[in-house]
Image (spheres, helix red, strand yellow):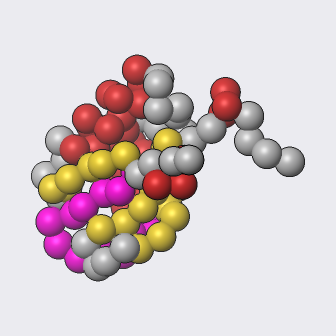
């Protein structure tokens, strides 16, 4: 069963200032609180860069606010949408 477009998730890459355990419960809770969106860990790209999914669609204004809120964190150096899996 596939995920309908209405509930699809936004994939993002988050670059942190220092190496982090990207799937730690504390970090996931903190990212969820900061963004006001449910944040789910996907994978590590490097010790400082991790892939996540946010519970908002990329065309939702709440999602843009969530990305801006994560980018404003002192421990984050970059937030980019990860659309590699959605490209034709």
Q: Who is closer to the viewer here, 37 or 80?
A: 80
Q: Who is closer to the viewer here, 22 or 43?
A: 43
Query: Is 20 rendered above or below residue 28?
Result: below
Can residue 20 be seen here? yes
Q: Is residue 16 magenta?
A: yes
Taking the spot 74% from the left edge, 41% from the top edge, the residue there is 3
Taking the spot 52% from the left edge, 33% from the top edge, the residue there is 56
Picture coordinates of residue 54, whole percent (x, y): 49, 44
Q: Is 23 placed left or right of 71 in the picture? A: right
Taking the spot 41% from the left edge, 74% from the top edge, the residue there is 44
Q: Is 26 placed left or right of 8 in the picture? A: left
Picture coordinates of residue 65, whole percent (x, y): 32, 28
Q: Is 2 placed left or right of 11 in the picture? A: right
Picture coordinates of residue 78, whole percent (x, y): 20, 53
Picture coordinates of residue 32, whole percent (x, y): 43, 45
Q: Which residue reaches farthest top? A: 61
Q: Is 23 placed left or right of 73 in the picture? A: right
Q: Which residues are magenta?
A: 12-26
**Residue 33 position by quadrant:** top left
**Residue 67 position by quadrant:** top left
Count of labels in the image: 0
Q: Who is closer to the viewer here, 3 or 34?
A: 3
Q: Which residue reaches farthest right? A: 1
């Amino acid at each position: 069963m596939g995920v309908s477009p209405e509930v699809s998730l936004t994939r993002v890459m988050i670059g942190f200032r220092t190496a982090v355990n990207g799937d730690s419960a504390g970090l996931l809770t903190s990212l969820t609180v900061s963004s006001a969106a449910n944040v789910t860990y996907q994978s590590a790209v490097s010790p400082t860069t991790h892939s996540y999914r946010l519970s908002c669609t990329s065309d939702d204004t709440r999602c843009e606010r969530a990305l801006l809120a994560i980018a404003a964190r002192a421990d984050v150096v970059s937030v980019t949408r990860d659309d590699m899996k959605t490209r034709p």
